[in-house]
């Protein structure tokens, strides 16, 4: 009887772990999608106001990193980068005196635990990405009709 209970517990834990990954994947997809909406609003505000804080560029960098991590199956890191992107886009929108799109604020359900080490890691990854890839600055982004590479495709 005791061995049966132990086996049952291991089986249940295995099922929970197997089911947790798709949940994180969907959560990451949801966060990335919502962040893209806010980045588009930030881009629109930049075009309208012609003010450049650097936060739009940084938001794009973090969002592209989020998509890369999502594609690599690292959903927690994808969420952390996408949330950072949204924070930067929101800050940019507010600096320009515009309203953040209603309903796209960051919710507690979207957040993942981020300690000081993860914070530093996220910042370092973004700096390295910016050095490795030619991401236009805010002024150049404002001259583009749209921003590519900040959304997942429908089949991902």
Image (cartoon, rainbow, N blue to C red):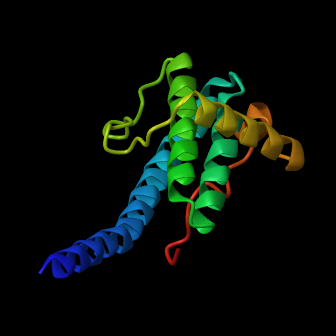
Of all residues, the one furthest to the left in this rendering is 1
34 on left or right of 15: right
Residue drawn 49% across the image and 41% down it: 38
132 on left or right of 120: right
What is the total number of numbered labels drawn onto the structure image? Answer: 0
Residue drawn 65% across the image and 39% down it: 122
144 on left or right of 22: right
- 100 vs 96: above or below: below
Could you say where residue 94 lies in the image, as x and y percent from the top left? Answer: 50, 21
Q: Is residue 146 visible?
A: no
User: Which one is nearer the viewer's eye here, 52 or 77?
Assistant: 77
Q: Is residue 155 visible?
A: yes
Q: Quadrant of the N terminus?
A: bottom left
User: Which one is nearer the viewer's eye here, 5 or 40?
Assistant: 5
Kindly indicate the quadrant of the structure image that contains residue 14. Answer: bottom left
Residue drawn 61% across the image and 48% down it: 63
- 155 vs 76: above or below: below
């Amino acid at each position: 009887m005791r061995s049966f209970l132990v086996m049952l517990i291991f089986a249940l834990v295995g099922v929970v772990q197997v089911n947790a990954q798709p949940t994180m994947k969907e959560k990451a997809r949801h966060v990335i999608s919502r962040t893209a909406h806010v980045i588009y609003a930030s881009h629109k505000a930049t075009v309208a106001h012609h003010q450049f804080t650097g936060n739009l560029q940084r938001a794009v960098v973090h969002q592209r990193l989020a998509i890369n991590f999502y594609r690599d199956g690292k959903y927690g890191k994808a969420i952390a980068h996408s949330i950072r992107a949204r924070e930067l886009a929101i800050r940019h929108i507010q600096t320009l005196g515009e309203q953040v799109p209603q309903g796209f604020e960051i919710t507690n359900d979207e957040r993942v635990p981020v300690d000081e080490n993860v914070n530093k890691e996220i910042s370092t990854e973004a700096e390295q990405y910016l050095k490795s890839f030619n991401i236009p600055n805010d002024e150049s982004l404002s001259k583009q009709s749209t921003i590519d590479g900040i959304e997942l495709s429908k089949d991902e």
